[in-house]
Amino acid sequence: MKEYLLLTGEEVSKLDREKTVFVSVMSPIETHGTHLPLGTDVFIARRVMEETCHFLEKGHEVVKLFELPLGSDAQPVFGSISLSYGTFRRIVYEIGAQLAEMNFKYWIVFDNHGGPRHQLALAEASTKLKRKYGFNLVVPFLHIFQDMLNDSADIGIAPGMNGDANDLHAGTNETSLMLYVDSQQVRRTDLPRYFPRKKSALGKLLRFLGAESLAVTVEWINDPENPYYLGDPSLADPERGKKMIEYHVRRSLELFEKAKSGSYQPPKLFNPVVRTLLRLVK
């Protein structure tokens, strides 16, 4: 893997436009309970990128662009650092546009953050880059997160442990991932299952609009008893984390193949009403 920062402009100009794939890690700094580090999403995405690139390098020139510990909708609690949806979308789009103007075709962004406006910003930047330049910004986690929310059998991990709406943040899934990626960074696992007990009026509206995970997120964030995780860390298992990493890698390679065939599109996130609400909320 080449490092973009170590190349000269002349060396970049000589890269094969058909075979060059830029890769980046992009996830926000975010509080993950008292048991996982602020960089959890970054560390997981970094591991997925490394293992995916092991396969990509067999037929492509892989160039690590840079790592950005940035994003939108980090949990709004002490320790988190978050960008606005509009700022994050512009950053991603403008980077992709400059790569496209140099006639490159592929950029894979590795991520592990399910914040709704974070994902919406990435999906919209990808769509706009494809439409304006024919450039492929591939964001595997946009698709993987939908697989998780839908309890896809392809993941091979039971509901409630795979990052679905009952395990959204620093619960069984993310704690398992960190036990596999870097167990020394996991402070403890002896924490009880947490799930918000009260359904709010806004949550009920979002459920009516078909946005269950968003409803759970709103109720969790506004719960005064919020322990800054959602799920059950006590069930975490490094073997399950390994299995999830393997799924991330497999899906990432599948989606890149779609980009090469010209058929890659980011998923359609939320319905038009929910998308409008997300754009309006500060």
Image (cartoon, helix red, strand yellow):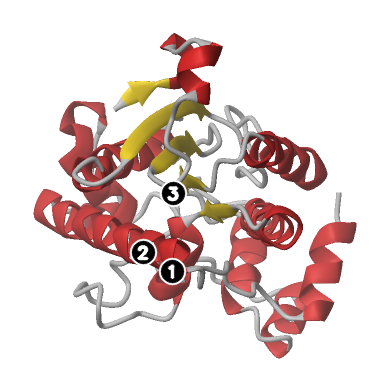
Mark 3 or mark 2: name the one nearer the start of the chain.
3
- Image position, residue 271 (x, y; %): 73, 81
* Residue on which the image places disc 2: 257
Residue 261 numbered tag: 1
* Residue on which the image places disc 3: 112
Mark 1 or mark 3: name the one nearer the start of the chain.
3
Secondary structure of the residue carrying numbered label 1: helix
Residue 179, by quadrant, is top left
Residue at the image position 44 percent from the left and 47 percent from the top: 18
- Viewer-closest of 197 and 54: 54
Secondary structure of the residue carrying numbered label 3: loop
Looking at the picture, which amino acid does disc 2 mark? Answer: Glu
Local packing at callout 2 (Cα closer than 10 Å; few below 14, some 14-19, many 20+) is few
Secondary structure of the residue carrying numbered label 2: helix
Residue at the image position 47 percent from the left and 72 percent from the top: 146
Looking at the picture, which amino acid does disc 1 mark? Answer: Ser
- Viewer-closest of 164 and 193: 164
